[in-house]
Image (cartoon, grey):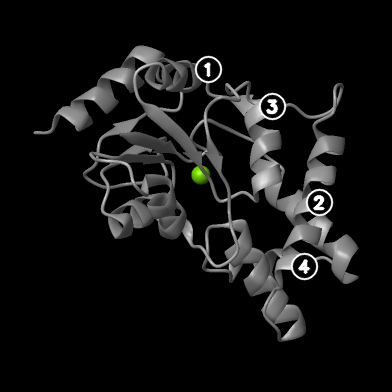
Amino acid sequence: MPLCFDLDGTLGHFSSGFVLLREALGGLWGGAPTAEELGRCGGSTDWEIVDELHRMRFGLPLTEAGYADYERACVARFQAAFAPGGLAPAAYAGILAGLHRLAARHRVWLVSGNAPALLAFKAEALGIDPAIPRLGSLPGHDRAGLIRRALEGCPGPHLYVGDRPHDLAAARVAGVPFLGIGGAVPGDHPLLDAAAEADHLVQAVEALLSGP
Ligand SMILES: [Mg+2]
């Protein structure tokens, strides 16, 4: 039974992420998208967001080659910004420890809106076991599509763990239960603080999997 975790805001955070995304596109497109343009994007994955920004700028959909260019440029920005002596991500130590404990008993996946190479960089920076499969933002997929892809062929019950309303919405569309992390995803689902300890995460997940 795959337990799928979002990364940004769920397992830790990289505070300058959207600045680096805009800078990466600025280098490729001859001018960075504005914060206002970024705010008009409705998607929650890199493919959706960069496609929306590309349509605003050029009036054309993003190509897969254009997405690959973005992915390379964005990873390079993150590698430079988060190099030793530079910025450091905030890791949610208890949540991460709980994730690894759950991975010893269940199938656990990272299912994130980051482009795959960026997800790989962030997972390594947060010290996540490389044996845990990662599914990043793919062309033509929204977040619910990514969750469905992670669950393909696997018997339920499943679970999505995330920190934002778009994570909750994607879990609902994919038909899986949801566990929230932090204060930015209100609702009647179970919710843990980002500073929760490993035991709290494991107990919350096991309670959800055992049903009402
Ligand atoms: Mg998130």
Label 3 to label 1, Cα distance in Å?
13 Å
Q: First in sequence, mark 4 or 2: give its number.
A: 4
Residue linked to disc 2: 72
Nearer mark to the viewer, of 4 and 1 = 4
| Label of residue 66 in the image | 4
- For ligand 1, tell me if the residue under mark 1 lies within 8 Å: no
Q: Which residue is mark 3?
A: 125
Considering only order in the chain, which callout, 1 or 2, is on the residue closer to the N terminus? Answer: 2
**Marks 2 and 3: which is nearer the front?**
2
Q: Mark 2 is on which residue type?
A: Arg
Q: CA distance from mark 2 to mark 1?
A: 28 Å
Q: Is residue 66 left or right of residue 42?
A: right
Taking the image as shown, residue 142 lies to the left or right of residue 49, namely left
> Reading the chain from its start, which is encountered first: label 2 or label 3?
2
State how far apart marks 2 and 3 are (Cα): 17 Å
Marks 4 and 1, how far apart in space? 35 Å
- Point out residue 157 in the picture as x, y percentages from the top left corner: 23, 39
